[in-house]
Amino acid sequence: MNSQNDYLKPYIPYDSCELITHPVLELRVWIHIVQKSTDHPENLTSDSINFIKKQFNWINSIYSNLKPPSITPPYNSISYIKDARIRFVVDTITFHIDETAWDRMKLVKEENKKRWMKILAINS
């Protein structure tokens, strides 16, 4: 049976594929951490870098040791790939001091009257 996704098969990293043709892809990640203030960050700090790297090691272990599907695939097709061959690499960690951005649930009344466009009508 031909699938609409057959064109993807050459790109799927089956366990039998060579690393030369299907290498491990490293995705470099730039982490932005927003802190409330210098004195009271109320978030991760520079002391947390080891913790952050451990989290990414945990994520990478999930991607490199995928579990078989719990549902039997249709038509006896092969759908289990043990290693996704994707790894996340912590490239940069930036800390931002910004109380407004830190409190993303905070509601602030907009003072600029020109910011919002007046809705004249809703036609449904």
Image (spheres, grey):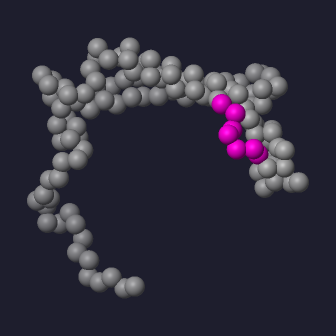
Q: Position of residue 93 (x, y in %)?
A: 37, 23
The relative height of residue 27 versus residue 109 in the rendered view (above or below) is above
The relative height of residue 25 versus residue 124 in the rendered view (above or below) is above
Q: Residue at x 65, y 29 (%)?
A: 66
Q: Nearer the viewer, residue 80 or 99?
A: 80
**Which of the 4 quarters of the picture holds residue 45?**
top left
Total marks in image = 0
Q: Residue at x 18, y 48 (%)?
A: 106
The relative height of residue 3 versus residue 13 in the rendered view (above or below) is below
Q: Residue at x 43, y 18 (%)?
A: 53
Q: Position of residue 69 (x, y in %)?
A: 69, 38
Whether residue 69 is in magenta: the answer is yes
User: In this rendering, does residue 111 appear at all?
Assistant: yes
The relative height of residue 114 versus residue 19 in the rendered view (above or below) is below
Q: Which residues are magenta?
A: 67-73
Quarter of the picture holding the C terminus? bottom left
Instruction: Provide the major secondary structure of the magenta segment.
Output: loop
Left or right: 114, with 121 as reference point:
left
Left or right: 67, with 79 as reference point:
left
Q: Nearer the viewer, residue 34 or 73?
A: 73
Whether residue 97 is in magenta: the answer is no
User: In this rendering, does residue 85 appear at all?
Assistant: no
Quarter of the picture holding the N terminus? bottom right
Q: Position of residue 96 (x, y in %)?
A: 25, 30
Left or right: 37, with 62 as reference point:
left
